[in-house]
Amino acid sequence: MTDLILSGVSKTFGNTRAVEPTDLTFAKGQLTALLGPSGCGKTTLLRMIAGLENPTRGQIKLGDDDITDLPAHKRKFGMVFQSFALFPHYTVRENVAYSLIIGGMSKPTALEKAESLLATVQLNGFGDRRVGELSGGQRQRVAIARALAQEPQVFLLDEPMSALDAKLREDMQVELRLLQQRLGITTIVVTHDQREAMTMADTIVVMSNGRVEQVAPPQDIYHRPANVFVADFIGKANFFDGLYQSGGVMIGSQALEVPANFAPESPVRLAIRPESACLATELGPNRIPAVVGFVRDLGPVREYHLTTDIGPIIVEYAAGSDEQKLTAGDKTLVHLPPDALRVYPRTAA
Amino acid sequence: MTVADDIDVAADSPAEATPRLIRKGALYGVLSALMVVFCVVPFILVIVISFGRKVEGAAWVWDFTFENYQRFFVGVLWPDEVTFLYLQQLGYSFYFAIIASLLAVLTALPFTLLLTRLKRSAQAIWLVFILSSLSMSEVFIVMGWDILLSNNSGLPRLFQVTGLTQWLKDVGWFQTLRDIGLANPRNVKFKPSEFATILTMSYLVWPYAVILLYPALSRLDPSLSEAARTMGASRWTVTRTVTLPSIRLPLMGTTLLLFVFLLGSYVTISVFATPDKQTTAVAIYSNIRGSNLNAPFGSAQAVILLISASICLYFGHLLNRKAEAR
């Protein structure tokens, strides 16, 4: 098994640039999530990797082999489609055995192997069923078993959980990750669900408007977002616009210390995660007077929606933590620790 | 039904509801009567006349004889002599209808597949064009093909003028065409021939094939064939193992429908088929309106053709159910 390398790969449909020139390396045995909003080019990128779309420019290599012009049926990358694309005219077992039979394996051997693959995805005894007799989760498992039957070097999944309900989706995310770790296959998952990406991926590729915004492990993506888009798209964040002064940022009349260095008077945007901000009782640097507007208790977390001179701020505490217990209308201070503040250059809108 | 409709219905008193029921009943009654007069009565008449008797030198008289059916299956001289002329005609009806419907479906299938991959606006233009071609009558289409295939002004003339005939002779293929009846000693000749008959019959029903296949093919999930490709299937394997099995029911349904439609084909057969390969439909016309003036025998042939078509449809239905059960 070898790395999958994309060099300057781009795709244009007519006058629309779906994927900007992209350089990416998918490390062998790792699970990478292509994450972004609808229409950001992540599925097009996946389809180019699968050989279902030809790149307009660039090169795709599997190890030392250039596979840019290799047709899909010769790449044999296992792929799970959003709709699962199970063949309705075959039984579950025949679906799983499909790639083996057309690959030249004898039918009895292929069907036997299909049965063991069905056991891998915990579908023992489902082999004789028709696709129409399966639930959404079962269909997904069949699609995974079918894609894995040909023992692919690269395993591709296009929004594999989108057709499942929320509870099943959470279970399947964990299950899929465990299966991938057990088999050690290089896996690329396309998703628009950041929770799904955070749960499953070793590396997340955040995309927007056909561009790669950041490539990093989930924790880095969350705690050290590369730009405003990533900070906004992944998780929740409080944003403030201001002007950089030496050692700090002026937001209106409020000065905040920040660990960044910009040219004086540069317009910047600050971001801070709700759980990184906290309530305070004593005045000090980066502590701003606030009024509680609304308390949202979600069970595992409690959110304080605050009104301040620099704009609305949400502060989040995990259940059981010893924060001040405030109610709507209470006056307080909100602390924005300098090391938790991310500073980004702000371009004119 | 909306809540407002519910309230309206509930508000109707029995006195108001009764005249409405009567009006509704009367409408159904009139429609049923029209159905009986225009559909059932002619059909029953044909069945009844098929048991009638031809009077030589005159028309025919009501009777209840199986002579016409006997004539159809074993000939008029049975039991002294057995002839299968009319069974043979029925055989040609089936032969032409089966080959032409299969040819139409097989050629319409790739076209329709390509059509479904075009942009919506292009698809709409093609569909309107195909639908409009359905408005041309069989006579008009046959006349067009008659000119196109005629020996003096059509394709054979073009073959001769362009030197294609000479080229066929030079490469030795001309003799093969002669062997299958598509050439005379001097030039290629397309009519009368099975080739021209089947070609024109296929052409007649080809738009129907496209229109009937289009809904099924446009609903075909493209990710099915893409999934097969990612699993190592070549384009032909995808067609064989995924596309065709996925649309087998519409394919069978379309073929059956075209087959039944073509069983009654009259103008094409009378223009392009050789005299020894005329079909039951042509024979029915000659008996009822043509030179024979033997309506009872023509009716018997019509009934047998109808029963044969029904049997085919029934078997087609059984095949469909079997395929669905798989």
Image (cartoon, rainbow, N blue to C red):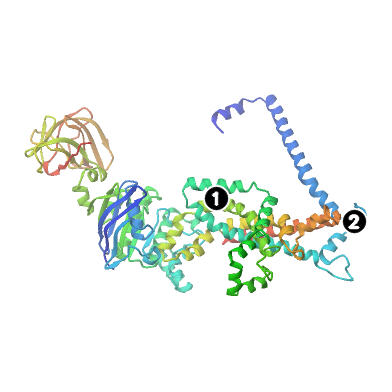
Q: Position of residue A305 (x, y in %)?
A: 23, 34
Q: Position of residue A25 (x, y in %)?
A: 25, 60
Query: Which chain is indicated by disc 1?
Result: B
In this rendering, would A202 be left or right of B188? left
> Where is mark 2, residue-wise?
B54
Question: Which of these two is toward me, B176 or B287?
Answer: B176
Observer able to see residue A28: yes
In this rendering, would A150 be left or right of B195? left
Image quadrant holding the N terminus of chain A, namely: bottom left
Given this view, does label 1 or label 2 mark the residue nearer the observer?
2
> Where is mark 1, residue-wise?
B215
| Mark 1 neighbour class, 10 Å CA radius: few under 14, some 14 to 19, many 20 or more | few
Which of disc 2 and disc 1 is earlier in sequence?
Answer: 2
Residue in the image at 41% along x and 59% along y: A143
Image quadrant holding the C terminus of chain A, namely: top left
Vertical comparison of B112 with B186: above or below? above
Q: Position of residue A181 (x, y in %)?
A: 29, 62
**Location of residue B1 by image quarter:** top right
Circle 1: residue type: Pro
Observer able to see residue A200: no
Question: Which of these two is toward me, A205 or A176?
Answer: A205
| Mark 2 neighbour class, 10 Å CA radius: few under 14, some 14 to 19, many 20 or more | some
Q: Give the structural element (helix, strand or loop) at label 2.
A: strand
Question: Which of these two is toward me, A83 or A164?
Answer: A83
In this rendering, would A302 be left or right of A278? right
Total numbered badges shown on the rendered structure: 2
- Discs 1 and 2 carry the same chain letter: yes
Q: Give the structural element (helix, strand or loop) at label 1.
A: helix
Circle 2: residue type: Lys
Question: Which of these two is toward me, A153 or A309?
Answer: A153
**What label sits on residue A27 in the rendered view?**
none
Residue in the image at 67% along x and 65% along y: B189
